[in-house]
Amino acid sequence: MGVNSRGFTVTELLVVVAIISIVSSIAFPTLMSQVPKFRLNGTVREIAQKMYLARLKSVRNNKEIRMVITNNAYPVQDSYHLEKNSGGWSVVS
């Protein structure tokens, strides 16, 4: 042991890579099963925000505002399209 060595051996690196692979293979399916929940929560927050903005627009203009959620198969005439064109958010005044 007279040699002063620094760094890691190949065996140590392979063990660490194997441990990371095993933990990743266990965690990945769990994370992927949560993706629909994350998307749903994001959509709910976005709808709530758009409803709030429609309410503010209604109060500001003293007009009735309707929020129409479509799939863009039947576009709403005379509407103000918000950020999501593909999702079909429309605020109709």
Image (tube, rainbow, N blue to C red):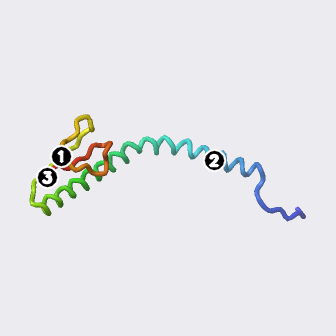
Element type at marker 1? loop
Q: Earlier in the sequence, mark 2 or mark 3?
A: 2
The residue at 36%/46% (across/down) is: 39
The residues tagged by marks 1 and 3 sit, at their Cα atoms, a distance apart of 12 Å
Residue 22: x and y in percent read 60, 43
Q: Nearer the viewer, mark 2 or mark 3?
A: 3
Q: Please give the name of the residue rendered at 51% of the width and 45% of the height, measured from the top-left corner.
A: 27
Q: What residue occupies the far right of the structure in this picture? A: 2
Instruction: Identify residue for label 3.
Output: 65
Q: CA distance from mark 1 to mark 2?
A: 59 Å
Q: Earlier in the sequence, mark 1 or mark 3?
A: 3
Pick the residue in front: 52 or 10.
52
Crowdedness of circle 1 by 10 Å Cα count: few (<14), some, many (20+)? Answer: few
Q: Nearer the viewer, mark 1 or mark 3?
A: 1
Q: Give the total of numbered labels.
A: 3
Q: Which mark is residue 12?
A: none
| Picture quadrant of residue 1 | bottom right
Q: Quadrant of residue 52?
A: bottom left
Q: Residue at x 66, y 45 (%)?
A: 18
Please name the amino acid that badge 3 sits on: Ile
- Please tell me the numbered disc located at residue 19: 2
